[in-house]
Amino acid sequence: VEADPHHRARRLFFDLPDPRLPGGSLRSLRTPVRIGEPPLQPAPFLGADTRAELEAAGVSAATVDAVLALLR
């Protein structure tokens, strides 16, 4: 798919720098609809925001700790 001439002409695939990963980048796909060039950043790792989201939903810190302990 990446070698398709149309995709190459549109520069839809690119390397997104991410120092957390081996090799330091992640091959990514741009949206074909562009409005300006917003700064690109990698998504957080799965579960990175779990504590903040649960606490924002009113879950007690003790319960959050217990849930996170189960997920490890």
Image: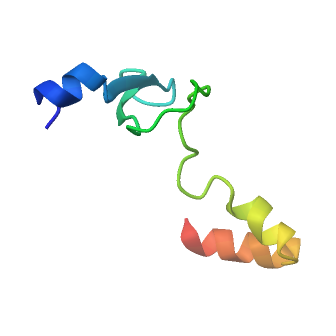
**Render colour scheme:** rainbow
Q: Is residue 49 above or below residue 38?
A: below
Q: Position of residue 12 (x, y in %)?
A: 31, 30
Counting every numbered tag in the picture gives 0
Residue 45 shown left or right of residue 16 in the figure: right
- Residue drawn at x 83%, y 75% is 57
From the viewer's side, name the closer residue of 55 and 68: 55
Residue 17 shown left or right of residue 71 in the figure: left
Q: Is residue 59 above or below residue 16?
A: below
Viewport quadrant of the C terminus: bottom right
Viewport quadrant of the N terminus: top left
Q: Is residue 70 above or below residue 2?
A: below
Q: Is residue 13 above or below residue 50?
A: above
- Residue drawn at x 79%, y 60% is 52
- Residue drawn at x 21%, y 23% is 8
Q: Position of residue 43 (x, y in %)?
A: 55, 43
Question: Can you tell which quarter of the image residue 65 is in?
Answer: bottom right
Q: Position of residue 30 (x, y in %)?
A: 39, 35
Question: Can you tell which quarter of the image residue 6 is in?
Answer: top left
Question: Can you tell which quarter of the image residue 5 is in?
Answer: top left
- Residue drawn at x 57%, y 24% is 37
From the viewer's side, name the closer residue of 17 and 22: 17
Q: Position of residue 21 (x, y in %)?
A: 43, 30
